[in-house]
Image (tube, grey):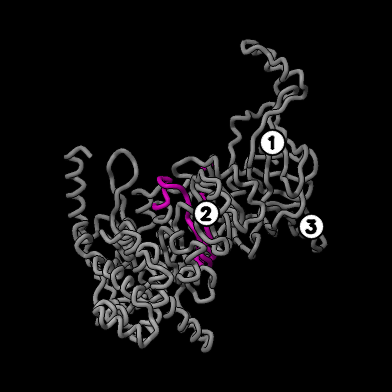
């Protein structure tokens, strides 16, 4: 080891982590929670996360009689001997390097080696082939099942360490995407997008921590690397086209359609709002009453104030009138309702209440009595063609509107994917394999809370995982509102700052060793920092998230901004903003 050691392991356990005493020349203030460190044992090298920082003294007398603030000489004498700093580390991964060498007789011998050409990670065999490795060492990254011995030295993680664990973005053998950098180094931290999209994932954080920017980053990476097709239910119209950025100075950031004009298609439930924002070529989208089922109403029962009795009578109506049951109900007179109840054993008061409350659906701009055109089928055709679909809500972004439309559309698309997956399992023909689909939803706790998760298609998708090639990307500020069973199925969790204890507990549902990471999550900055853990990374890591700016556009987008047909319109708008002093 040529690096400067930071400290020595003085005690610890596999369950509680390691305690490290810092060397006298190491400043305690340089040790930040979430920092990535390595411990060099006798045989193995341990990748660890710093989870706590503390101060210690060798004698109670020092605490009882501390040196005078002006007596710097005594303070320097005590530093490192009478007073010292300690840090707590949680080992995440370990490896025992073995280099296969040829002796002069041609026989193979094993010696301790450096980074090699193949790495396997925890929980699923993450392999990384490094074209930078010069030796023929074979390194296997494994879950930690032991700890280093006393006085093992602790070092800052090097760029080589990060590349060994997290890979690099240009790896030709993997769909790696750089999501950010460590908090104290300029080296990329990569997600394995193939592993990311094969399970449902979550982006969490309190309001104002940059969840939307994180979501744009990830969706851009999935599109650029062609890891899956996306169906994005854009509640606040901020993913498809340009949206306002956060900050005191007004500015805008590009949407996915602007970055990938040939790959992203926008559908809108509010065409007037979409046109006012300058969006070109957006497809209109409407939903007919005959597409709304009782299961969809169960999801929005709170917004419509529907009783259990009303829902039970809705089932009676559906069984009698089929898909046209809502249209028939809204057209029924009191006498017709009375006659229906007498013959079908329904409740007049419940059906009349249901009729009265369903009239609220007429206020939604995208609702029609019937839709001759199959809009959901059109979305499916776009997805099958490899297009990424953004569904904008415009002014129709209230919870009733968002939850109803999202559930109706997603339920039909999921049914289609189930049919395709079953056909693929039967034929085993590669051409019949459905494209992996990622469905992005906001306000996820509204769909996945314990009381409604059994009624929504999103609960079904979350529990089925990758069985039918459909997964979720849930964006939410209240993870504690999501059902525990669903949270345990979330593969990768990207979490910005959270303050509520219940929300922090929810993030670590089903995560072994999650208790040691609580302090890390609670100490994140409020902007551009996130804790990433789960299926798509070999170990938990704190990152400074990648900026979503002009540099990012140039690195990841399909078409330069200047080459877009509508670029001149937006250049003029930007010029006008500048003239007005924004």
206 in magenta? yes
Which residue corresponds to the image point at 30% horizontal and 81% vertical from the top-left?
A: 338
Residue 197, horizontal then vertical, whole percent: 50, 66
Q: Is residue 502 above or below residue 257?
A: above
Does residue 544 appear left or right of residue 259 in this picture? Answer: right
Does residue 371 appear left or right of residue 117 in this picture? Answer: left
In the image, which is nearer the foreground, mark 2 or mark 3?
2
**Within the image, what quadrant is residue 399 found in?**
bottom left
Question: Marks 2 and 3, Cα distance to the nearest angstrom?
Answer: 50 Å
Which residues lie in the magenta part? 185-212
Reading the image, the residue beneath label 1 is 5
Residue 155, horizontal then vertical, whole percent: 67, 40
In the image, which is nearer the foreground, mark 3 or mark 1?
1
Name the one closer to the observer, 485 or 431: 485
- Could you say whether the residue bearing mark 1 is in a helix, strand or loop? loop
Considering the image in quadrants, where does the C terminus appear?
top left
Q: Earlier in the sequence, mark 2 or mark 3?
A: 3
Which residue corresponds to the image point at 50% horizontal and 76% vertical from the top-left?
A: 468
Question: Marks 2 and 1, Cα distance to the nearest angstrom?
Answer: 41 Å
Task: Answer few, some or many: residues within 10 Å of disc 3's Cα (few below 14, many 20 plus, some between 14 and 19).
Answer: few
Name the one closer to the observer, 8 or 205: 205
Residue 320, horizontal then vertical, whole percent: 36, 87
Q: Is residue 144 above or below residue 56?
A: below
Please indicate, yes or no, whether residue 373 appears anywhere in the rendered image.
Answer: no
Reading the image, the residue beneath label 3 is 110
Number of labels in the image equals 3
Which residue corresponds to the image point at 64% horizontal and 35% vertical from the top-left?
A: 53
Reading the image, the residue beneath label 2 is 480
């Amino acid at each position: 080891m040529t690096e400067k050691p930071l400290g020595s392991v003085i005690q610890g356990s596999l369950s509680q982590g390691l305690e490290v005493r810092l060397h006298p020349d190491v400043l305690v203030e340089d040790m930040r929670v979430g920092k990535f460190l390595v411990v060099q044992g006798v045989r193995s090298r341990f990748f660890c996360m710093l989870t706590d920082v503390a101060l210690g003294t060798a004698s109670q007398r020092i605490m009882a009689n501390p040196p005078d603030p002006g007596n710097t000489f005594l303070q320097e004498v005590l530093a490192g001997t009478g007073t010292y700093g300690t840090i707590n580390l949680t080992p995440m991964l370990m490896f025992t390097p073995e280099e296969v060498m040829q002796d002069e007789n041609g026989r193979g011998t094993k010696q301790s080696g450096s980074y090699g050409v193949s790495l396997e990670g925890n929980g699923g065999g993450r392999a990384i082939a490094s074209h930078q490795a010069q030796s023929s060492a074979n390194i296997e990254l494994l879950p930690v099942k032991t700890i280093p011995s006393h006085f093992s030295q602790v070092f800052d993680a090097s760029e080589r360490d990060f590349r060994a664990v997290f890979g690099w973005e240009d790896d030709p053998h993997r769909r790696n995407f750089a999501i950010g950098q460590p908090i104290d180094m300029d080296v990329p931290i990569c997600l394995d997008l193939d592993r990311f999209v094969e399970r449902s994932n979550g982006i969490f954080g309190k309001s104002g921590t940059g969840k939307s920017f994180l979501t744009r980053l990830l969706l851009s990476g999935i599109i650029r690397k062609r890891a899956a097709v996306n169906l994005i239910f854009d509640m606040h119209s901020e993913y498809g086209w340009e949206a306002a950025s956060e900050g005191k100075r007004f500015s805008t950031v590009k949407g996915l359609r602007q970055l990938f004009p040939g790959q992203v298609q926008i559908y809108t439930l509010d065409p007037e709002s979409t046109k006012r924002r300058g969006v070109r070529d957006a497809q209109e989208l409407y939903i007919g009453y005959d597409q709304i089922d009782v299961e969809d109403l169960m999801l929005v029962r709170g917004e419509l104030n529907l009783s259990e009795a009303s829902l039970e009578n809705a089932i009676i109506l559906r069984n009698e009138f089929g898909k046209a049951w809502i249209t028939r109900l809204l057209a029924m007179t009191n006498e017709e309702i009375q006659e229906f109840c007498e013959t079908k054993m329904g409740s007049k008061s419940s059906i009349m209440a249901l009729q009265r409350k369903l009239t609220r659906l007429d206020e939604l701009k995208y609702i029609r009595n019937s839709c001759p055109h199959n809009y959901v089928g059109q979305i499916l055709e776009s997805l099958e063609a490899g297009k990424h679909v953004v569904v904008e809500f415009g002014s129709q972004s209230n919870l009733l509107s968002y939850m109803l439309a999202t559930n109706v559309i997603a339920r039909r698309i999921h049914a289609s994917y189930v049919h395709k997956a079953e056909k693929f399992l039967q034929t085993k023909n590669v051409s019949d394999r459905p494209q992996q689909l990622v469905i992005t939803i906001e306000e996820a706790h509204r769909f996945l809370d314990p009381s409604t998760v059994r009624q929504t298609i999103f609960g079904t998708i979350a529990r089925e995982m990758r069985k039918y090639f459909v997964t979720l990307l849930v964006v939410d500020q209240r993870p504690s509102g999501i059902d525990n069973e669903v949270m345990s199925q979330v593969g990768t969790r990207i979490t910005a700052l959270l303050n509520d204890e219940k929300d922090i507990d929810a993030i670590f549902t089903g995560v072994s060793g999650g208790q040691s990471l609580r302090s890390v999550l609670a100490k994140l900055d409020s902007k551009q920092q996130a804790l990433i853990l789960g299926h798509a990374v070999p170990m938990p890591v704190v990152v400074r998230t990648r900026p979503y700016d002009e540099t990012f556009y140039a690195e990841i987008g399909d078409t330069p901004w200047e080459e877009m047909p509508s670029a001149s319109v937006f250049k003029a708008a930007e010029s006008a903003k500048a003239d007005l002093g924004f």
